[in-house]
Amino acid sequence: SQTIHQWPATLVQPVGSPLSLECTVEGTSNPNLYWYRQAAGRGLQLLFYSVGIGQISSEVPQNLSASRPQDRQFILSSKKLLLSDSGFYLCAWSVDGTSTDTQYFGPGTRLTVL
Amino acid sequence: AQSVAQPEDQVNVAEGNPLTVKCTYSVSGNPYLFWYVQYPNRGLQFLLKYITGDNLVKGSYGFEAEFNKSQTSFHLKKPSALVSDSALYFCAVNNAGNMLTFGGGTRLMVKP
């Protein structure tokens, strides 16, 4: 069966520091991968998605970037964190990225920027 | 463009009573609709989805949802609520490939 991991689970970082969040998927090949941010415990905003190694699509221009160095690894980064980057970051995967495809979510990373 | 509305921020129900969490959608073309549940400080768990066919979709943990094309709705239901069903519920729509659009979420509180 497929599993998705995210780490770290929680992170507290000062403003201006760098960020690296990691997501890995097991039990599948060539998944579509997604990064979402959930602010204030409610709505989810799609940040990035990837259909393959090195292929990244950005949905919202911002202080963050994403990379996919390996088939089942998706990384969210920032060079300098802002207070507004605080939130709950969720990684998800799907089989083929079609409209009927189900996205499956990881456990999330809670980021607090102070 | 596609959008989802969850008109209730919170739904309160007594344990053992039926529950309904409302969702309406707006899409051009065929709507593919999803429900997810989120427990505190956890990721989203997939409950069920509607693609085509029978308007009543059955999912995990005894939940079901009814697709109503004329009312553009996809309400989540359960015949008998449990305290453990208390969580945040999200409706989502997708008819644009990788663009899954979520509603704002509804907090379900089931009281003993």
Image (tube, grey):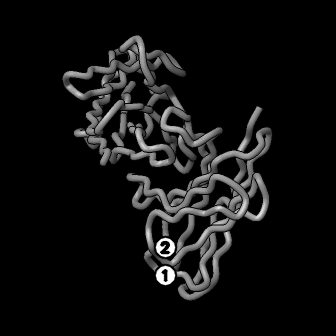
Q: Quadrant of the C terminus of chain B?
A: top left
Q: Nearer the viewer, residue A66 or B63?
A: A66
Q: How many marks?
A: 2
Return the x and y of residue A12 as percentages of the image width and height: 60, 74
- Gap between marks 2 and 1 measured at Cα: 5 Å
Where residue B80 appears, as percent x and y from the top left, is 40, 14
Helix or strand or loop: what does disc 2 sit on?
A: helix
Residue at left offset 49%, top offset 26%: B48
Q: Is residue B66 left or right of residue A113?
A: left
Instruction: Name the secondary structure under disc 1.
Output: loop
Give me the chain letter of mark 1.
A
* Residue picked out by circle 1: A82
Does residue A13 lie above or below B111 as drawn? below
Q: Give the answer, above or below, for where B26 lies relative to B104.
A: above
For label 2, the residue is: A85
Residue A55 in view in this figure: yes
Amino acid type of the residue that numbered disc 2 sits on in the rendered structure = Asp
Residue at x-position 45% and y-position 73%: A61
Front-lying residue, B93 or B83: B93
